Amino acid sequence: MSDTSKPVALITGGGRGMGEAIARELAAQGYQLALMSPSESCEKLAAELGGVASRGVAEKAEDLKTIFDLTMKTYGRIDAVVNLSGHPPKGDLLDISDENWTLGSDMMILSLVRMARLVTPVMLKQGKGAFVNITTFAAYEPSLVFPVSCTYRAAAGAFTKLYSDRYAADNIRMNCILPGYIDSLNHKPETAEKVPMKRIGHVEEIAKTAAFLLSDGAGYITGQNIRVDGGVTRHV
């Protein structure tokens, strides 16, 4: 049974890695959780943390609708949303197929639009709410290694700014976190040498940043792209 005194967070990609760390941090801060991920990992984590879960992927509108409906049926409210998608296709710039570009669009930008369409009316009725979109440090320093990701993560930042402009006066905020090299992936030892801090970031550091951006303590922060990358980007 839900506790109406506790805030509710919906997390996509909330089974492993950064999504799991964010779920654990928010649970520790008193949030009730609704998790989505492609595998049973979200179900196991939800059971451990006392939440609910539904398997699905961010690029499918019907999966987003399913976790939204489950969240509302269970808790009757949504205070926070964390949008985290899988890894998009890679390849040489002009060799990437139309299908893979379309998949990237569905995964990294339309997923944000679709979730916002679902949740915004709920937050408007509640009088407040906050979104955090997890993108990448390379969103504004594009790399040919990740052409689809860089293209659509930059678009995610633009959508975030547009959304924040539209709904700021309604006390609904949206920000992006741009992670650097994080230990949710297995990085080569030499990767840390690219980072001014000379180390790989921890998923818990992303989680604490997300929790802050969702909190009332960040109540005057919206439309921002927050780099959590150990200083690896040169953009100022």
Image (cartoon, grey):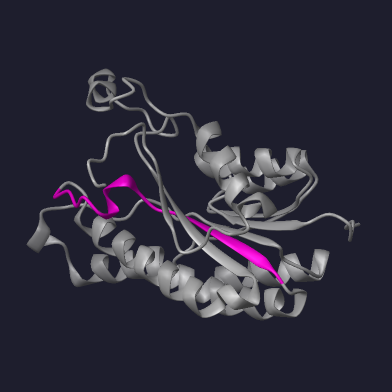
Q: How many marks?
A: 0
Q: Position of residue 228 (x, y in %)?
A: 41, 40
Farthest-out residue, front: 220
Q: Which residue lies at the image location 81% right of the left edge and 64% below the top edge?
A: 74
To which quarter of the image does residue 199 belong? top left
Q: Is residue 173 visible?
A: yes
Q: Is residue 20 above or below residue 96?
A: above
16 versus 171 height, above or below = above
Looking at the image, which residue is at 66% across and 39% down? Answer: 25
At a point 61% along the width and 70% down the height, the residue shown is 172
Q: Residue at x 51, y 62 (%)?
A: 222
- 151 left or right of 131 in image: left
Observer-nearest residue: 185 or 150?
Answer: 150
Expressed as whole percent of the image width and height from the top left, the position of residue 198 reads 31, 20
Q: Is residue 66 left or right of residue 31?
A: left
Report whether 119 appears left or right of 161. Answer: right
Q: Which quadrant of the figure contains the N terminus?
A: bottom right
Is residue 40 among the parts visible in the rendering? no
Spot occupied by residue 149 in the image (x, y as percentages of width and height): 28, 56
**Location of residue 30 by image quarter:** top right
Q: Position of residue 213 (x, y in %)?
A: 58, 51
* Residue 23 or residue 127, whichever sits in front: 127
Q: Image height check: is 58 above or below 33?
A: below
Magenta-highlighted residues: 128-144
- Is 233 colored magenta in this rendering? no
